[in-house]
Amino acid sequence: MTERLAPILRVRDADAAATWYARLGFARLWEHRFAPDLPRYVGIGRPGMEIHLSEHAGDARPGTLLYLYVDDVDAAAAACGGVEIASQDWGRDFEVTDPDGNRIRVGTVPS
């Protein structure tokens, strides 16, 4: 096993959240639910990255901020509806907010 980190984001609807994150290249990896009427816990990922989406109220705080490094920030911005990319000292990036208020900064390091 390779060690890795998987941040947990609080979401109201894991299906809607997984669909939203697909625009950033994430695909559903797995889903867990203790019983049919209980909240879902869903893993999404893209190469080298994994995020857990939890409908469980105590798992994470709404409004979390993640920074996602990508190779092609222009393509990611286009996939998010053509949001504006800012040039920063640390590289070029943009910020989007998922349906549950979690903020995702997407950027690339300067070449």
Image (tube, rainbow, N blue to C red):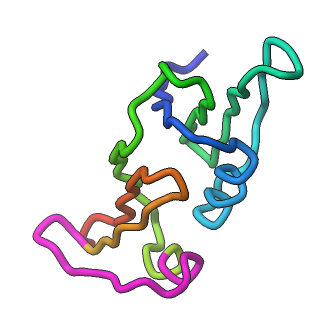
Which stretch appears magenta? 77-91
Q: Position of residue 72 (x, y in %)?
A: 47, 73
| Furthest residue toward front | 37
Q: Position of residue 58 (x, y in %)?
A: 48, 19
Report the front residue among 52 and 45. Answer: 52
- Is residue 19 part of the magenta span, yes or no? no
Residue 93 in the image: above or below residue 61: below
Q: Position of residue 65 (x, y in %)?
A: 33, 47
**Image quadrant assignment for residue 93:** bottom left
Which residue sits at x=77%, y=20%?
A: 38
**Image quadrant assignment for residue 56:** top right
Residue 107 in the image: above or below residue 58: below
Left or right: where 39 falls relative to 7: right
- Is residue 84 part of the magenta span, yes or no? yes
Which residue sits at x=34%, y=51%?
A: 67
Which residue sits at x=68%, y=27%?
A: 41
Which residue sits at x=42%, y=50%?
A: 102
Left or right: where 67 falls relative to 30: left
Residue 13 in the image: above or below residue 10: below
Report the front residue among 20 and 100. Answer: 100
| Furthest residue toward right | 36
Question: Looking at the figure, which quarter contains the C terminus?
Answer: bottom left
Left or right: where 23 falls relative to 92: right
Residue 70 in the image: above or below residue 72: above
Question: Looking at the figure, which quarter contains the N terminus?
Answer: top right
Report the front residue among 38 and 32. Answer: 38
